[in-house]
Image: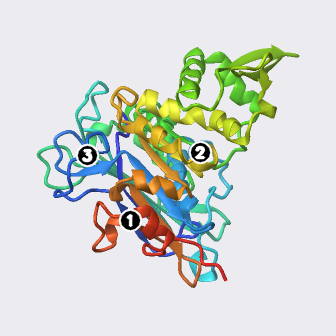
Amino acid sequence: MEIHLIYQIEIENFYSVRQKQVIDLRAGQKVPDEQGRLVPIFPGSAERAPRVVAIYGANASGKSNVLRAIAFISWFVQHSFQHRAQAILPYQKFMTQSAFVDPTHLKISFAGSEDPTDEGSTKTCPYTYSVEMSGRDAENRERILSESLHYKPSGSSRMVRIFERDFAGNVKAADWLGLGKERAVLESILRPNSSIISTLGQLNNRFALQLIQAASMIETNILITRFTADEHDLLTNYATDEDLLDSLNRDIRRVDLGIDAMSIIAENGAPVATFSHAGLDAPVRMMFESHGTQEFVRIYPTIYRALRNGGIAVLDEMDTAIHPTLLPEILRWFSDPDRNPYGAQLFMSCHAVSLLSDLLKEEVLFCDKDSSGSTRIYSLTDIRGIRRDENFMANYLGGVYGGVPVVG
């Protein structure tokens, strides 16, 4: 099973997002067709959503927290069973006393397999995954208040339950999920701070393993429980994946960073990156390359894997790695069927206002904060009267849309 397209996200009491924010990426039916950019949320659907979502806003406005919501769900589904029983979950509530006692709610809607029992099925339909988390309880433990997964196969007039879990850990599930004898074991090992999906994965439940695999295809530079991969790990990845290195070198030449190729050599048992440049007689080591080139090399594997596998790239501050004049080329990869044959999607935060001239209004989100420090998330399509042909960059810089820093 794959997560083909995320088209709606709900976030409440998560980092700077205090009040429930609903990010609905679905385009209206009257919106002109944009080949490769606005695509059906599943084959045959009249509803469409963007392949690329760019999030703008002032520093500390909450842009990264939108991406963290996606990254947290991916981590929770995959790894929460391995999380220590008494450990807090790796997220924060809104930092006020009243918010500490209120639940955190995350919900994500996406396209997935219409026949979850058939691993070879290519038909897709809407899915909705939801999790609600409390604060720490009387025993100083984090607790899941509810967790559910629903889908809407063709012919169904409503969302159909795949599983639901309540505060006490009781589980209701569709018969085809195949719990059977697993149910008693599941309820005995299901911890208050772990996901049903992650737990069922330990029992080798086939559908849970499909969901875990799907969640692993969310590629991100937002870190939940681990430190940033160091340069040794990064370069080892390039050294052991010939296709990745070849693809990087093709794109380095295409985006014209002034580099002919990156090579990986072994030095004292460790991988070292060197760059050959036209007109230079010796290669340049990575540490002496520009910051932009170094960041491009670091971020490239995330983009590459999403495009290669049909996953979802979730990238924070993408414009720190890629010059604003090169960003439109990178974004075009996601609408190019040759570069993106499996329908990868990109969520990114950035400050590169020049990119607004290359984006559709359905591809733009804004974040800003109210006087209490709570993040508000809205789309350019939420602002009444915005024409498709107006100058988004000039209007944004002029404060027409909000989401810009206020100085003084």
From where the camera sits, is residue 389 visible? yes
Say which mark, if any, is on residue 379: 1
Give the class, few, some or many, for how many residues have Cα within 10 Å of label 1's Cα (few <14, many ≥20): many
Label 2 residue SS: loop
Residue nearest the viewer, comparing 209 with 8: 8
CA gap between label 2 and label 3 equals: 25 Å
Is label 2 or label 3 in front? 2
Q: Position of residue 252 (x, y in %)?
A: 58, 28
Give, as a three-letter code, the residue at label 1. Answer: Ser
Tell me the residue at 64%/71% (across/down): 138
Tell me the residue at 14%/49% (across/down): 156
Q: Position of residue 393 (x, y in %)?
A: 45, 62
The disc, 3 or 1, on the residue closer to the chain's N-terminal end is: 3
Tell me the residue at 51%/30% (across/down): 305
CA gap between label 1 and label 2 equals: 24 Å
Is label 3 or label 1 in front? 3
- Mark 2 lies on residue: 323
Q: Position of residue 33 (x, y in %)?
A: 21, 48
Give, as a three-letter code, the residue at label 2. Answer: His
In the image, taking residue 183 as reference, residue 369 lies left or right, namely: right
Query: Against 306, is 150 above or below?
Result: below
Say which mark, if any, is on residue 34: 3
Say which mark, if any, is on residue 278: none
Label 3 residue SS: loop
Residue nearest the viewer, comparing 165 with 312: 312
Marks counted in the figure total 3
The disc, 2 or 3, on the residue closer to the chain's N-terminal end is: 3
